[in-house]
Image (cartoon, rainbow, N blue to C red):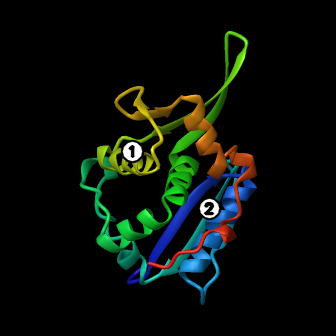
Amino acid sequence: MGRVWRLRIVLDIKYPAIIDRCREAIDAVMPRQRAAIVRRPTRCVEVGLYSKHWPCLFPQHGPGRKHHRRIALEPWQQALVDQETEEFICGLIHSDGCRVVANDRGVRSIRYHFSNRSEDIIGLFTAALDRLDIPWTRSTRYIVSIYRKAATARMDEFIGPKDSAVPLGHVHYTA
């Protein structure tokens, strides 16, 4: 709208904890405003906020699809990721990933998958996993998988099922 930018995040309505975390995160970044939650007829909600400041906070934004342009973190963004690596991974799993409980020949097995077409975003995700010493594999060109029992147990410590997301209030940023 003219000179004001709009951040819109569309989320599945069946994960109210993630919707709450998203709204809380936006409200924390813009404390004088409150993010709106708009219900859509497609079993989704849209969490959004208008601000002139979004381009400053998301300098990666640009024309075209994200997997056709370079995505790199600014030094101040990387400092935040380094400070809250678990939170960064959690956000990526909540947006473009999943936690699967599989049945491997009668044995319950937890797996995490992250899918993205941007090699840069996959690189940010895998670098964060490496920082936490969580082993990963590339299942396909666009999918990163975490299969090992100790690795998925570690991921469950700070992510877990999407229907029981940890409240955002437990995260404190200082960068």
Residue 146 is left or right of residue 37, and the answer is left
Disc 1 crowd, CA 10 A, few/some/many (<14, 14-19, 20+):
many
Amino acid on which the number 1 mark rests in the picture: Thr
Circles 1 and 2: CB distance less than 8 Å? no
Residue drawn 49% across and 69% down? Answer: 7
Residue drawn 64% across and 31% down? Answer: 100
Q: Which residue is mark 1?
A: 126
Q: Position of residue 3 (x, y in %)?
A: 38, 84
Q: Position of residue 124 (x, y in %)?
A: 36, 51
Q: Position of residue 142 (x, y in %)?
A: 38, 34
Quarter where residue 76 is shown: bottom left
Amino acid on which the number 2 mark rests in the picture: Glu
State which quarter of the image contains the N terminus.
bottom left
Q: Identify the secondary structure beneath mark 1.
A: helix
State which quarter of the image contains the C terminus.
bottom left
Q: How many marks?
A: 2
Residue drawn 24% across and 55% down? Answer: 70
Q: Position of residue 171 (x, y in %)?
A: 61, 69
Question: In the rendered view, would you say 113 is above or below 174?
Answer: above
Q: Which residue is mark 2?
A: 46
Nearest to the observer: residue 71 or residue 33: 71
Query: Is tag 1's residue or tag 2's residue first in the polypeptide sequence?
Result: 2
Question: In the rendered view, would you say 2 is above or below 38?
Answer: below
Residue drawn 58% across and 70% down? Answer: 48
Nearest to the observer: residue 166 or residue 21: 166
